Image (tube, helix red, strand yellow):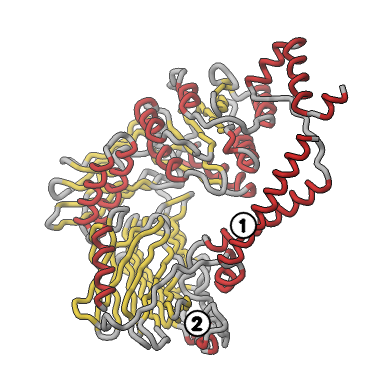
Amino acid sequence: MQHYLSNPEILNKRLNDLLNHYDPELAREFRSKNIQINIRRRLRWQDRYLLILFSILFSLMLLASATANADETWGMQFTRNDQLIDAVALNTTIEVEVIGSQARVEVFQQFHNQSDQWVEASYRFPLPDNAAVDQLKIKVGGRTLIGEIQEKQQAEKNYQQAKQNGQLTSLVKQEKANQFHTRLANIGPDEVITVKIGFLQAVRLIDGEFRLRLPMTFTPPYQPGTAAEIYNPTSELASRKLPAASEHKLMLSVNLLTNFELTNLNSSYHAINVHETSHGYYIILEDPTQSGRMQHTDRDFELVWSLQPQDQPAASVLTWEDDDGFYAQLQLVPPRNEVLDERPREVIFIIDTSGSMAGVPMRQARQALAVGLEQLRPEDRFNIIRFSSDADSLFNSPATATDKALRFARTVVKDLHADGGTNMRPALELALKNPPNDDHLRQIIFITDGAVGNESEIFQFLYEQLDNTRLFTVAIGAAPNNWFMRKAAEAGRGSYTHIGKLDEIAERMNLLWQRISQPALEDVCIDWGQQAEMYPAVVPDLYAGDSLFVTARLDGPATEVTICGQLNGVGWEYTQPVSGKHANADIARLWARNKIETIGDNQLLGLPFIDAREQILDVALQYGLLSQFTALVAVDPEPVRSPTEAISKSKVASLMPNKMSLQLAQGALGWQLQLLLGLISLLVAGGMFWRSGIQKDD
C-alpha cells in the first residue's frame, strides 16, 4: 500500500481499473468525455518557488513581446542615425464629400524634416474599416509625385531601385483594413513635405442614424508650450518645442449631398457650423477664435444625421457614365417603425460551446443567449442548438415560447460550458432539418467566435441550404473571426453583430432584436430594365433602422429602376426615376471595390487562387484601387541625391498601449534584455524538469 501511495502513476492506474470493474457504464462515460482520475503529488516548497519565478519571467517576456508588436504610430516619422523621430505636423486640412452611401475623403498634411541629413520617411494613417485608398499626392520642395497603381511586387521593385538611384520616390501599401503605410525616400534636409491622401468610405444607416467617422489621431496631441516632438530624450532635437495648440491649424469641411429631408445633424465631439445649400448641407468646424473654445484634434470626428421617416420605403439613385461603362448606386431606406408589423417568428439560437470559447467568451455567449430569450413573444417559436465537436438541440422541433419552455431553456443555458472542437455544419443541419412554417419567419441567430477552418464548406452549405431562412451572426470575444461572421451573415441575408465586452451584451443584443423583429422589406428584388452586374449579388432584406446599398454596372444609360419585395407580408413594388445629378467617378470605384470583394468570396467557394488573383489584379489596375495584389508607387524621374550620399534606413515605430511613449518600447525591454530573460526562463524550466526527475526516482 505504501508503494502505491508513493507512486501516483501506479495509484491512478489501480483506481481506473477498479472503476472499470465495478461501474463499466460510468467508466465508458468518463472515457467518452476524456475524463481521467488523476492524483498528483503536492508541490514541494522548492517547486513552488521555481514555478513562481518562471511565471514572473514569462509575464515579463509577454510584456516585451506586446511592446514590440503593438500597433504602429500614426503620422510621419523620419530616421536619423537609426533613431526614429516624429515629424511635426504644421497644418491639417480635411475635405469630405458625401453622396448617397459613400464619402470621398481627402486629407492634406504638412510635415517638416528638421534634420540636416537625407532621410527616408515612414507615413502611417488610420482608416475607417471600410475605406479604400485610391489617391496619393506628395509635394516636396518644387517637386510633385502622384501615385500610380501597380502590381505589388513590381511597385516594390520600382521603389527600391529609385531609392538607390537617389530619386524622390514613394510607395503605399494597405497593410490592414484600417491602416495604410507610405514610405518616402530621399527627403532633403529642412524640407517641408505636403501629403495628400484620398480614400473612399462607405456610410451606413445603423439603428436609424447615419454616422460618418473620421480618424483624427494622426495629429499629435498638442498641449500649450510642451516639448513632445520626439521619443528619444537624449537626442539633440529634444530641446526643440512643438508649436502651441493655438498655432496648429486644423480645417475640416463636409459637403453633404442628399435628396432626403434630415431631422438631425450634429457632431459628436466637435463644435460645427452648418449651412444649408441647394443640394444638401455644408458643414465646417466652428472657428475657435469666435467661440472662445479650442477644437480637439486628439479624438475622432463623427458626424451624425437622421432622415425624416417615411410611410413607404424610400429610394435614391445616383449614376455615372465614362468610357468604361455606365454605373449606378441605389440607396434604399426603410419606412418609419410605426407602419411595420411584427410578424411571428421561429427563432433558432445556435451557440458555440467549443474549447475556443472557454472563459469570458462562454460567459458572453450565455448572457447574449439569455438576452435573446427575454425578447421572445408568446406567438414566437424557438429552439436552442449547442455545438462543439458534435451538436444537439434543446427540443426535437421548435417549441412555442411559453413560460414553462423559457424557464427550462434558461436552466439549460446556465449549465453550458466550453469543450471540444468547432464543427459548425452539424448545428446548421439540425437548424434546417424541419421545414419552415409559412406563418412564422424563420431566423437563425448564430453565437460564436468564428474559430473555424472549413470556411469554404460552410459558405457553400449556406448558399445551397438556407433558402428563405435568415441568418444573423453574433461574434463573441475580443478577437473573433470578423470576416467569416460578416460573410456568413451576408450569405444568409441577415446582419452581423460584434460583442467584445460583457457590458456591451444587453445594448448590442437589444439593438439586434429591434432590427430583426421588424423586417421592413423582405425578398427584395431590383430590376434596372437592362443587363446589370450588381453587387451584392444576393440582395439582403431591409430592416427597421437600417439601409440597403447596391452598386451596378449597366449596359447603357438607366432611366428608371424598379424595386419590389414583401412589405408586411404583402407584395410591394416601386419605380424610381434615375437622375445623374451630383454623381462622380467614385461610383465606378465603389462598384469595383465591391467586385474585388466578391471575387475574394468566390475564391472561398472554389475559384482557384491563380484565377482570383488575375481577376482582382485586372479590376484593381483598371479602376486604380489598392488591393492585396496592388500598391501605389510614385517616382521622380530626376535624381535629387547623389547615390554616394548616405540615407538612413527606416524602421517601423511601435505604439505602446494607451499612447505611451515609444521610449519604453525602444529602451526598457530591448533585445538584449529579452534574450537574458529567455535564458533565465530556460534555466528555471530546466530546474523544474530536473526536480521532477528527482521526485520520480524517490
Look at 64% across and 60% down and name the residue there: 677
Of tags 1 and 2, the one toward the viewer is 1
Picture coordinates of residue 459 (x, y %)? 38, 33
Q: Which residue is mark 2?
A: 288
Q: Residues within 10 Å of mark 1 (few under 14, many from 20)?
A: some
Res. 216 mark:
none
Q: Is residue 347 visible?
A: yes
In the picture, which quadrant includes the N terminus?
top right
Query: Which of the 4 image quarters holds residue 99?
Result: bottom left
Element assignment for label 2 = helix
> What distance separates the C-alpha of mark 1 from that of mark 2?
53 Å
Picture coordinates of residue 207 (x, y %)? 48, 49
Look at 68% across and 22% down and name the residue there: 404
Where is 377 relative to 591, above or below?
A: above
> Could you tell whether 432 is left or right of 628 in the image?
right
Where is 697 relative to 641, above or below?
A: above
Res. 678 mark:
1
> Could you tell whether 176 is left or right of 573 in the image?
right
Look at 64% across and 25% down and name the residue there: 34
Q: Say which of 352 and 240 sits in front.
A: 240
Where is 370 relative to 438, above or below?
A: below
Q: Say which of 175 and 351 sits in front.
A: 175
Picture coordinates of residue 483 (x, y %)? 43, 45
Element assignment for label 1 = helix
Q: Residues within 10 Å of mark 2 (few under 14, many from 20)?
A: few
In the picture, which quadrant includes the C terminus?
top right
Name which of mark 1 and mark 2 comes first in the sequence: 2
Q: Is residue 573 visible?
A: no
Number of numbered tags placed on the structure image: 2
Picture coordinates of residue 183 (x, y %)? 35, 70
Q: Amino acid at mark 1?
A: Gly
Q: Amino acid at mark 2?
A: Pro
